[in-house]
Image (tube, rainbow, N blue to C red):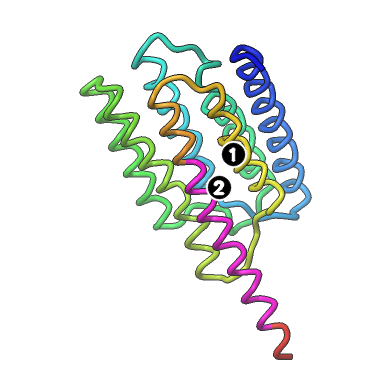
């Protein structure tokens, strides 16, 4: 199988996967089947937009050269809108969330001032790690899993598949960061489910 075909399969696969995830996540949110954190997804939207912009500015890359980042932006915007309109009160901003948002804005200001695309892209990956804090904090504090294993499983496959078509070190860093963060989150989700079942057996 030649490189062009592998690249095309990767691009189409990631696009279809992220489109499916977007539809599923929005539908589950609308039906109140899951309770995603609005703050996390707003962070995702801002950070993913910065990440894509700095990636494109760092060299002569196209939107398809980092297909994961490109489709992630569409996903994050759509999900944020769905959560804002259909999410419950637990998805609103807390003081912790606002603190994280300040960190996001500081890095954004750094980029506007320095125009250093590579360093800003690296700092943005830090934003994308911070973006997981609200949902991780909620999972740890409430010990209730409001996330979908199916959706996050799809979000784990997407960056793995995207590495077959991504170009440049920055695109690879973006994908690897996503894989690590999602794995950690899913392990925490499994922990919450395990503790819930363990607690249920006591009664």
Q: Could you tell me which residue is drawn at 61 percent across and 43 percent down?
A: 84
**Residue 170: percent from left, percent from top:** 39, 27
**In the displayed image of the protein, which residue is found farthest to the left?**
114
Question: Which of the image's four quarters has the N terminus?
Answer: top right
Q: Is residue 20 above or below residue 98?
A: above
Q: Could you tell me which residue is drawn at 40 percent across and 57 percent down?
A: 95
Q: Pointer 1: residues within 10 angstroms few (<14), some, or many (20+)?
A: many
- In the image: residue 106, left or right of residue 22: left
Q: Is residue 50 above or below residue 203?
A: above
- Location of mark 1 (residue): 80
**In the displayed image of the protein, which residue is found farthest to the top?**
60
- In the image: residue 84, left or right of residue 137: right
Q: Which mark is residue 104?
A: none
- Point out the stretch of residues depicted in magenta: 178-199
The answer to whether marks 2 and 1 mark residues whose Cβ atoms lie closer than 8 Å is yes
Q: Earlier in the sequence, mark 2 or mark 1?
A: 2
| Secondary structure at numbered mark 1 | helix
Q: Could you tell me which residue is drawn at 31 percent across and 36 percent down?
A: 123
- Location of mark 2 (residue): 38
| Secondary structure at numbered mark 2 | helix
């Amino acid at each position: 199988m030649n490189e062009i075909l592998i690249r095309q399969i990767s691009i189409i696969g990631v696009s279809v996967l992220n489109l499916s995830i977007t539809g599923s996540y929005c539908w589950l949110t609308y039906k109140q089947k899951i309770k995603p954190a609005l703050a996390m997804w707003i962070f995702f939207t801002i950070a993913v937009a910065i990440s894509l912009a700095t990636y494109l500015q760092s060299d002569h890359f196209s939107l398809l050269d980092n297909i994961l980042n490109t489709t992630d932006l569409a996903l994050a915007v759509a999900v944020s809108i769905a959560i804002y309109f259909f999410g419950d009160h637990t998805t609103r901003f807390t003081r912790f969330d606002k603190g994280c948002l300040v960190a996001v804005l500081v890095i954004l200001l750094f980029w506007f001032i320095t125009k250093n695309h590579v360093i800003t892209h690296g700092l943005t990956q830090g934003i994308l790690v911070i973006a997981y804090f609200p949902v991780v904090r909620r999972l740890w504090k409430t010990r209730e899993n409001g996330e979908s294993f199916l959706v996050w499983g799809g979000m784990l496959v997407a960056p793995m598949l995207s590495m077959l078509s991504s170009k440049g070190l920055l695109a690879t860093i973006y994908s690897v960061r996503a894989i690590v963060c999602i794995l950690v989150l899913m392990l925490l989700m499994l922990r919450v489910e395990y503790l819930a079942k363990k607690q249920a057996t006591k009664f």
